[in-house]
Image (tube, rainbow, N blue to C red):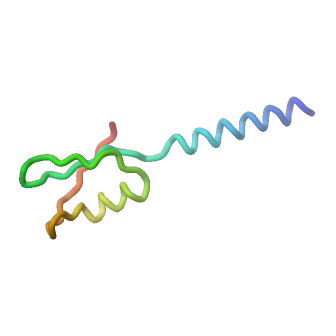
Amino acid sequence: MRKVRLTIGIAAVALAGLTTSCKKCHECHYDGPDGEVELGEKCGDDLEALEDNGYTVDGTNYTVHCHEH
């Protein structure tokens, strides 16, 4: 019984590690008037917001492009 509990515990920890390491993260940038501007790595809700809403600089909204690295 002790081995079963240990095995279940190890499996639970491994599964928790896998779900947190699979976070959706991408490198993002926008094309400004002087060329490409890097925004760095964005993840989760921040990534979705940038893709949906763009990035605003001095009243101008730019389309953000994100890609996996």
Residue sitting farthest toward the right: 1
Looking at the image, residue 32 sits to the left or right of residue 66; the answer is left
User: Picture quarter containing residue 10?
Assistant: top right
| Quadrant housing the N terminus | top right
Name the quarter where the C terminus is drawn. top left
Decide: is 59 above or below 16. Answer: below
The residue lying furthest to the bottom in this view is 59
**Count of numbered badges drawn on the protein:** 0
Give whichever of 34, 69 is nearer the camera. Answer: 34
The percent coordinates of residue 47 (x first, y second) are 36, 54
Residue 57: image location, x then y, percent: 18, 63
Considering every residue shown, the one lying at the far top of the view is: 3
Q: Say if 52 sits above or below 38 in the image.
A: below
Q: Is residue 47 above or below residue 25?
A: below
Indicate the position of residue 7 as horizontal and vertical percent values. Answer: 79, 32
- Residue 18 x %, y %: 58, 39
Image point (41%, 50%), residue name? 43
